[in-house]
Image: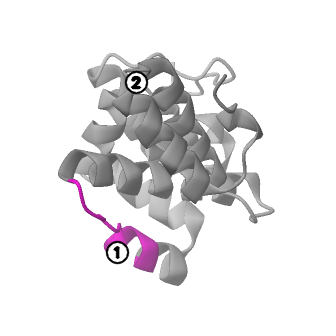
Amino acid sequence: MAADPSTMNDPKRIKILMQNALARGEEGLARLCMRRIFELGGAGHTDPLTQRLWQVVTAHEETLRIKHGRAQRATKTRKQIETKGALATLAALAMDKAVTPGFVAVIETGMAEFTGEYVILEYANRFDDAVVQAARTRLEGFGIALPKTWRSRLT
């Protein structure tokens, strides 16, 4: 029986498990591994919003790494987090008119909860209405179900 990725904390070991699962055609296990890698991206951050943002960055980088077969660092996003903080970075992602390849790649995994727009709706009370509306519009435009905990202030 394969290891349970939800109990693992070493991304390198999880990636090996994921590669082995893919080689054996075990798509479900590979998907669980990917989810766990994304979750661990936020480890070590005490603010839940910042933790979720780093999960988003990890999801972006990992999905593009898998798609292109090489590391794809989100350098611009990482720099923006460092200089402007989590809130401003998430707001900028939502307000940008362009849809990033990372967003599309994460959506294609079926794990929209690891997009910045989804995180904004989870923490809507920390953002301006325009940012929340932009995040909602983008997710709805891709047919993504909104977070169950989210309640619209804009309806």
Q: Which quadrant of the figure contains the N terminus?
A: top right
User: With respect to residue 118, does 75 lie above or below?
Assistant: below
Look at the image and say whether residue 77 sits in the magenta stretch: yes
Instruction: Give the structural element (helix, strand or loop) at label 2.
Output: loop
Residue at x 63% of width, y 28% of height: 2
User: With respect to residue 112, does 62 lie above or below?
Assistant: below
Residue 51 figure quarter: bottom right
User: With respect to residue 69, does 145 lie above or below?
Assistant: above
Label 2 crowd bin: few (<14), some (14–19), many (20+), radius 10 Å:
few
Residue ranking furthest to the bottom: 83
Q: Which colour style is shown? A: one colour
* Rendering coords of residue 3 (x, y %): 68, 33
Residue at x 33% of width, y 51% of height: 95
Q: In the visual, does 68 lie left or right of 58?
A: left
Residue at x 50% of width, y 83% of height: 83
Mark 2: amino acid:
Gly
Residue 121 figure quarter: top right
Residue to which mark 1 is pinned: 75
Residue to which mark 2 is pinned: 110
Between residues 139 and 35, which one lies in front from this camera angle?
A: 35
User: With respect to residue 50, does 107 lie above or below?
Assistant: above
Magenta stretch: give its range. 69-79
* Rendering coords of residue 91 (x, y %): 45, 56
